[in-house]
Image (cartoon, coloured by chain):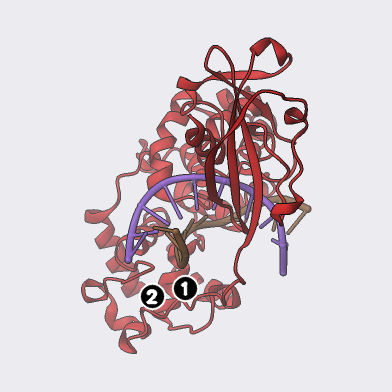
Chain colours: A red, B brown, C purple
Amino acid sequence: MEKHINKHLLGWYKNNKRDLPWRRLQANKLPNPYYIFVSEYMLQQTTVPTVKKRFEEFIKKWPNIKKLSLISESKILNFWVGLGYYTRARNLLKAAKLIQKNYRGRIPENFEDLINLPGIGDYTAKAILGIAFNQAFIPLDANIERIISRIFAYQLPIIKIKKQLEKKSIKFISKKYSSQLIQAFMDYGSLICTPRNPKCKICLFNMNCKSYSKNLQNQIPVKNKKISKKLLKFSRAYIFNNEKNEILIRKRPSKGMLASMFEVPNDVWVNNKKDLIKDKLILNIKNKIVSKGLVKYSFTHFDLETEVFIINVKKNKFLNYRWIKQTKITKSGLPTLMKKIVAVAI
DNA sequence: CTCCGGGAGC
DNA sequence: GCTCCCGGAG
């Protein structure tokens, strides 16, 4: 059955593959390993459409490991703005520096070396080996997990059946066409065997799908049991606007949320509104402070509600701070939350 | 507006 | 098992 499904997938892939910039084939009929390496970091917890917009920009700036290995962390963090999960950017840069130093700039072609690089886990190591080097692996991403759990109609959350999925996935591995098959699976999951309302009617191997035969395709994969309602936290943010229409920003601590990213001054995030404590910068301000409304923002494990204030100040009262022009906010190194906060105020 | 999808580190 | 963001769908 696995061979039969693979054949359909490979045939389908020929005519239906997504045109993605990191997939362009080299003379050896495989993609550029550096492109796969970079794209897999970007694709962790981030959807293809978002990565598509940013990948080519990245490659233009840093076209190979060597170029990338020479830059500083602040450069890559500044680029990463809007992609989120900023640890990925730090790890990508660390990995590039290690590859330049220890492997003369060549992406390692074996599992051991890859998985020891920062930011590369089981999935990413197998994805790089399979897609870029055509080695016989099946990386279990959300698409492939969904397809396999539907084929076998597993009625438990993915997290509970990782072992079974891994075992089943091995039978699908292709020695000869590994690179194409992996990408075929992923595209099929993204376009046909979709998370919601899968297109079972036109699926090429619906006769092999236990979920389809039991009409369970909309229940599988089973959702992870509900995480209790997200915590709501509170903050207040202060837009210091100077006579040149510039806004004061500063760097966040190197640990925790939005680590080392820029921010506008804001109070420590607290669970109860009444526990809010004014940020040091605002304490001795006599100028008029005007509320501009609320910004709600959702993180992985809590939501944040921030009241935004604007204060007109003189630039020379705030030495040792960075300012950015109001007109340059969208292109600035501010993470998305901070851009939304500024947008409410101006 | 709410909900949901998407891997690694510790 | 908890911590890390953001965009798109409904």
For the residue pair A213 and A221, the one nearer the viewer reads as A221
For the residue pair A248 and A64, the one nearer the viewer reads as A248
State the image coordinates of residue A18 (x, y, percent, origin top left): 30, 50
Q: Quadrant of the N terminus of chain A?
A: bottom left
The chain under label 2 reads A
Q: Identify which residue is drawn at 38% across, 55% down.
A: A183
| Residue occupied by mark 2 | A2
Identify which amino acid the numbered label 1 is placed on: Lys
From the viewer's perspective, is residue A73 above or below residue A18?
A: above
State the image coordinates of residue A291 (x, y, percent, origin top left): 57, 37
From the viewer's perspective, is residue A152 above or below residue A15?
A: below
- Quadrant hosting residue A152: bottom left
Report whether A4 appears left or right of A55.
left
State the image coordinates of residue A337 (x, y, percent, origin top left): 55, 41
Give SS at disc 2. helix
Assess whether mark 2 and mark 1 are in contact (beta carbons under 8 angstroms). Answer: yes
For the residue pair A57 and A136, the one nearer the viewer reads as A57
State the image coordinates of residue A226 (x, y, percent, origin top left): 57, 75
